[in-house]
Image: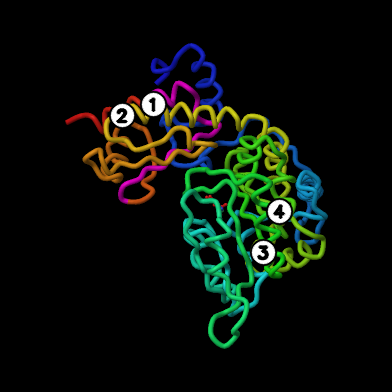
Amino acid sequence: MRGRFTPKGMTDVAEMEERGVSSAVDLRSDTVTRPSAEMRRAMAAAEVGDDVYGEDPTVNRLEQRAAEIFGREAALFVPTGTMGNQIAVHLHTRPGQEIVCEARSHVYNYEMAMAAAFSGCLVRPVASSDGRLDWRQVAPQLSLAAPYHRARTGLAVLENTHNMAGGVVTGAAQTAELCRRFHELEIPVHLDGARIFNAAAAAGASVAELSRDCDSVMFCLSKGLGAPVGSMLAGSRDFIHRARIVRKMLGGGMRQAGVLAAAGLVALEKGPARLAQDHALAKRLAEGLAEIRGVEIDPARVETNIVIFGTARTGFSAAEIVARMAEHNVLAGAAGPDAIRLVTHLDVDAAKIEEALRVIRAAIERA
Ligand SMILES: Cc1ncc(COP(=O)(O)O)c(C=O)c1O
């Protein structure tokens, strides 16, 4: 394996090996990263207590730091982004309401129908060309009057960056404008900011600016920031107080969770600074892909760490290409019958990206 890397890459390989990163080029998601040595040290040394009693000092510190960074009154440590989103859905809505969101959004497609199962709500998806909600398309889908026909819109959920739209960033001005419009109609807004730090790095704005007008925001420590586990939900003091109760309902009240929060703190303080590297690697990946026969991708539209390319003109299905790639230790995910998603993260470097491109080219261009 070592032989496949440039001298610069060798340093990375040694560091990756220390963390137990496999030799595969794993581009399935930015959730596959292994905790750094610094995180493991922080976990081992973490001061802990019973967080259900509010007595874990490390969790409390993480919650305070997250609230500070987002300019909010309070924040809550939750095991997953899904739980953070669904707690927000539950608190902002009443059973029998609708939730409006972009058609490819996570809250609609990948959260096990929990908006319906747990909160009794119907999701009203709104298609957009690029993952950013366009008010002209949203407005006709809202339901505010005629209570005997259609359920009322009780919540809007935004996603930034937008995962399945290819890591697309919604800027601070556009988010503020959407929030203003929803709020005029008394519709609260939750931001699924699983990758809001990627959005901030790309937009040159702070996460506080990008989420300021949203009523609540969830972000993940366990994606690009590199923590092994955990997400945060931030909002007003009262909202987070009630969120803590719903977290307990969902079985998310953890005890000596400081061992996880310690890794989360390292992720929060150190993770954001290196996201630009992931974005540069994703751009390089997209540029290389654009040179492969039949691949459909516009590198100019790759804004963060997610690259989705079309395979319809290659002569192979996405699943076939993914399977061929896996034979050569390059892992990716099909994002539909004719689309493949690749995600860069801290456990891939420039050498691994070149290796991935070589394997993808061979998978597609071999007769
Ligand atoms: C946009 C988005 N929101 C929420 C989540 C949920 O995070 P988790 O996997 O921690 O439940 C993900 C995870 O991939 C995501 O991409």
Q: Nearer the viewer, mark 3 or mark 2?
A: 3
Sooner in the amino-acid sequence: mark 1 or mark 4: 4
Secondary structure of the residue carrying tag 4 is: strand
- Mark 4, residue position: 77
Of the pair 154 and 264, the residue shown nearer to us: 154
Mark 1–mark 4 distance (CA, rounded to whole Å): 39 Å
Residue 199 sits above or below residue 97 on the image: above
Image location (x, y in percent) of residue 79? 63, 54
Residue at 70% across / 45% down in the picture? Answer: 259
Sooner in the amino-acid sequence: mark 3 or mark 2: 3
Mark 3–mark 2 distance (CA, rounded to whole Å): 43 Å
Residue at 56% across / 23% down in the picture? Answer: 15
Q: Nearer the viewer, mark 4 or mark 3?
A: 3
- Mark 2, residue position: 292
- Mark 1, residue position: 288
Question: In the rendered structure, which amino acid carries the disc numbered 4?
Answer: Phe
- Mark 3, residue position: 182
Q: Nearer the viewer, mark 2 or mark 4?
A: 2
Q: Residue furthest bottom?
A: 148
Of the pair 130 and 254, the residue shown nearer to us: 130
Of the pair 314 and 4, the residue shown nearer to us: 314
Q: Are marks 1 and 2 in contact (CB under 8 Å)?
A: yes
